[in-house]
Image (cartoon, helix red, strand yellow):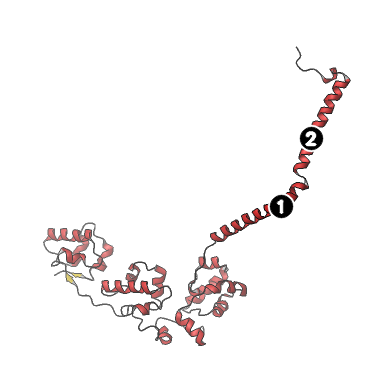
Amino acid sequence: MKIFTSHFWYNKSQRNGIFLLGLIIIVLQVLIFLDAFSSDKKIATENPEILAFQNQIDSLKAVEIESKKPKIFPFNPNYITDFKGEQLGMSLEEIDRLLVFRKTGKFVNSKKEFQNITKVSDSLLDKISFYFKFPDWVEKRNKQGKKYTNSEKYTSYNYEKISKKDVSTFDLNKATAKDLEFINGIGEKTSERIIQYRSKLQGFTYQDQLYEVWGLKKEIAKKVFEYFKIIEKPIIKKMNVNSLIFKEFLRIPYMDYELCKMIFNYKDEVAEIQDISELKKIKDFPLEKYNRLVLYLHAE
């Protein structure tokens, strides 16, 4: 049995009806297609409400893009790194010129000197110089109009020649909190913490002890040693490891409860420590602390 019958089997009026129906379907599809891409839809996008909504979306996108940009804080241009320079928009050649200049021990002390050394464009200089922050004495000197040539090398000692009014000494063990505030990046609280830690240690013996000050960033500590040095080492009165009681041990810098207990257990085993170097023989003794502890301890 045949399910489908050829349309030629229909009479003429039936075939015309089928043809007309197909034609109507095609025309309707064409009209729908043209309506979807007609100019009426384009004109609709110019509706004030739609434009206002689009502007709001664009402004939110702009705010998001701006918030993702790295924020720039005031900085001393003498310490620009490759990464920092790229962030500012400097080329590798411009960064290298500054780094080569700094390796000679010289400092850039004004926007003009920075441009002369790096050869950055006027437009870039205007953009980034707003964030330049030179030491206070440099700013003061620039305002007074004093001129120093680029050939001058400002080491920790000839800094003293031009800033004795600002800093009383460049000996780290004698410097006051006010002296330390001379360093860009050290404020009142940080300088006080440095002084307090120095008192606890009875003075800095090693340069890297400054890195132990709580809250002092490593890059700021490095700046300190561009100006200040340990000129006179402290005189520390050492205590006899064999005569100290537990509480006295705990007051010694670099000593903690576990280490103290470790030393006392060893003393119980050997009865008396003959030489302070015996501390290294104690099981699990932190050898990195030995040079620090022997500043305060001896055996007799």
Three-letter code for the amino acid on which mark 2 is drawn: Leu
Q: Quadrant of residue 260?
A: bottom left
Looking at the picture, how far across and down is residue 172, in whole percent?
33, 78
Three-letter code for the amino acid on which mark 1 is drawn: Asn
Q: Is residue 148 visible?
A: no
Give the SS element for disc 1: loop
**Circle 2 residues within 10 Å: few <14, some 14–19, many ≥20:** few
Badge 2 is on which residue?
Answer: 28
User: Vertical placement of 273 versus 205: above or below?
Assistant: above
Mark 2 or 1: in front is: 1
Relative to 110, 44 lies left or right: right
Q: Residue at x 79, y 35 (%)?
A: 28
Looking at the picture, how far across and down is residue 272, in whole percent?
12, 64
Looking at the picture, how far across and down is residue 275, in whole percent?
17, 67
Along the viewing direction, whichever of 201 and 136 lies nearer the viewer? 136
Furthest residue in direction right, as rendered: 12
- Locate the N terminus and report the quarter of the image it occupies: top right
Relative to 236, 190 lies left or right: right
Q: Quadrant of residue 12?
A: top right
Along the viewing direction, whichever of 63 and 268 lies nearer the viewer? 63
Give the SS element for disc 2: helix
Looking at the picture, how far across and down is residue 287, in whole percent?
26, 62
Badge 1 is on which residue?
Answer: 47
Relative to 211, 287 lies left or right: left
Q: Residue at x 39, y 75 (%)?
A: 224
| Mark 2 vs 1, N-terminal side | 2
Relative to 280, 171 lies left or right: right
